[in-house]
Amino acid sequence: MKKLGMEPIICATVGKDFGDYRAWMEANDISVSGIKVIDDMYTAQCFITTDQKNNQLTSFHPGAMEEGHNNPIPNAEGIEMVILSPDGKESTILHANEMHNKGIPIMYDPCQWLPMFDKSEVLNFIDQAEWIILNEYEANLLSEITGLKQNQIKEKVVAMIVTKGGQGSDIFVEDQVISIDPIPVDNEADPTGCGDAYRAGLIYGMINDLGWEKSGKLGSILGSIKVQSHGTQNHVFELEALLSRL
């Protein structure tokens, strides 16, 4: 998001090993004002194993993330929207309520944390959200947990965005489906972080009123750039060049 010229504020709890990454964030002019250090714990760790067909197995230890409920949302002034992504269970519920009560529009991004919540909790997240973004597997799991069909879930939000990996994405808004084609690449190096890159492009388009089709396409373009680099933050691009491809 920062590379796109936005000013994201990350609300998270980290451990005593945060120093090097803090230095990297500050060197890249990314705000750390919403990050709280838990001195007697280590930062959450995630290890993702990817096979030759891009199937992935994730191992995760939450660490300091479990203390997220002790880190309230920063001042709401000037915040255009938030993306509610995986965090500790207690903190996810707390922050969703905080943001909703402050009138901040929420994009609900359940990701792999869905099984941690029960039906009533997930339904509350949906009711508080303006938008939902998730992949096909998560969309099916969301229906399974809530007992709602996908068309019933779509009716509860302004838009529901479903990513489909190499098949592109679908944006369900009002009574239409906007299908976003995938961007073909010659060198597919690492899919880890492609969904995050897609979200960044989509949110940039939403904030800058590009419309759903261009916003989704920008997300796909960013995902295609990211997949050609190993690691989640090693890809490079120029914003002007991206926008010229829309």
Image (tube, rainbow, N blue to C red):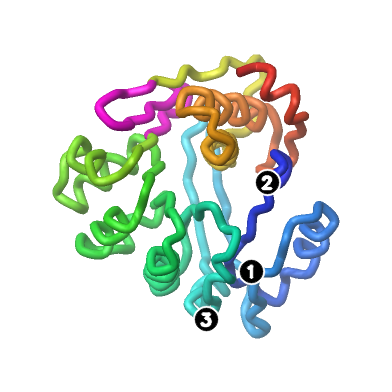
Q: Which mark is residue 70?
A: 3
Q: Secondary structure at mark 3?
A: helix
Question: Extreme bottom residue here?
Answer: 40
Q: Is residue 21 visible?
A: yes
Of marks 2 and 3, which one's residue comes earlier in the chain? 2
Amino acid type indicated by mark 3: Asn
| Percent coordinates x, y for residue 158 in the rendering | 33, 41
Residue flagged by tag 2: what amino acid is it?
Met
Q: Residue at x 49, y 28 (%)?
A: 211
Residue 5 percent coordinates (x, y): 72, 42
Q: Quadrant of residue 209?
A: top right
| 10 Å crowding of disc 2: few (<14), some (14-19), many (20+) | few
Region rendered in magenta: 162-178
Residue beneath the point at 39% across and 37% down: 135
Residue at the right extreme, as displayed: 27
Dots 3 and 1: beta carbons under 8 Å?
no
Task: Tell me the distance, in whole angstroms, between the alpha carbons under discs 3 and 1.
Answer: 12 Å
Location of mark 1 (residue): 34
| Number of the front mark, 2 or 1 | 2
- Between disc 3 and disc 1, the foreground one is 1
- In the rendered structure, the answer to whether residue 107 lies left or right of residue 72 reads left
Extreme residue in the left direction: 147
Tag 1 or tag 3, which sits nearer the N-term?
Answer: 1
Location of residue 117 in the rendering, given as x and y in whole percent from the top left corner: 29, 63
- Residue 6 tag number: 2
